[in-house]
Image (tube, rainbow, N blue to C red):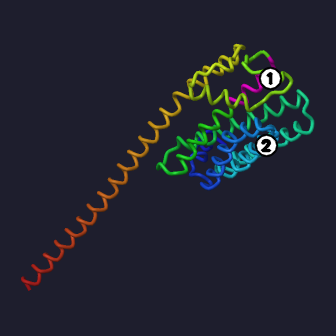
Amino acid sequence: MSSTSLRSQLAKPWAHERSLSVVLIFLLINVVLIYPLSVAGITGHLVFGIGFGLVLVSGVAATTRNTVVLAAFTVVAVISVVAHWVRYVNPTPPMQLADLCASLVSSALLTVILLVQVFREGEVTSARVQGAVAVYLLLAMTWAFAYAVIGSLDVNAFQETVTVNPTEVDTHRYMYFSFVTLTTLGLTDILPMSPIGRLLVILESIVGQLFPVILIARLVSLELYYRQRHFEREQATIERKALTHEIARELEELRAQRKKKE
């Protein structure tokens, strides 16, 4: 399949708008509830795994109608879910790294697919707005997995003001750090120490600033464009009706003139 054909397939309308709403719900649950639950003593890794698995499952249904893209994302999502549960049963460092890498790839792929849908040609609908919110949350989640991968490879990659277990990578701390970075809050309780970590922080900060600006510009331009098209269609309809009425009136006058001549 050519790149042009793939882009045209990705540009199709949302496969299921309700599924996209479900993606948003599970994302919000992961972001808002998982960290407090882990602090309260509930197994945060297990709960997060269930929530992230539900995000991926609902994401499969909400992504696209293109069978190739859908099949590819389904395979990646299944691998990610399986890797997570294998890590839960066998929490060794290699399995931990494999789980984080699989989660990173699946989250990044879902972000790209939804991002293409958000910026595609078409009218501004509720599905597009929901997709934009989902992309923003997924950006933070993707960067959190990237930070977690770096942290699992180098225990000194991030310096924290709280005492942590160096043998266990707590994804929730990186999720918190990712949102702080994406929204450019500038808190200093977690600091990147490695060059790759600092580079990722810079890139996420830039994306956090540019994404809302570009998104608003895109949505406004699309709304104005399709409103103009709608206005032009209405004007064309009015002109056609007026022309039809004028032709009918002229024909009626011609018939009246012929009757007078006869």
Residue 251 location (% of width, % of height):
18, 74
User: Which residue is depicted at the point 43% across and 44% down?
Assistant: 222
Which region is colored magenta? 143-155
> Circles 1 and 2: CB distance less than 8 Å?
no
- Identify the mark nearer the N-term, 1 or 2: 2
Residue position for label 1:
164
Number of marks drawn: 2
Residue position for label 2:
47
Compared to residue 124, the image places residue 184 above or below, namely above
Name which quarter of the figure residue 79 lies in.
top right
Kindly report which numbered mark, 1 or 2, lies closer to the viewer in this rendering. 1
Q: Residue 238 — which label?
A: none
- In depth, the one of 24 and 15 nearer the eye is 24
User: Which residue is depicted at the point 65% across and 28% down?
Assistant: 178
- In depth, the one of 202 and 260 nearer the eye is 202
Which secondary structure type mostly characterizes the magenta part of the structure? helix
The single residue placed furthest to the bottom in the displayed view is: 262
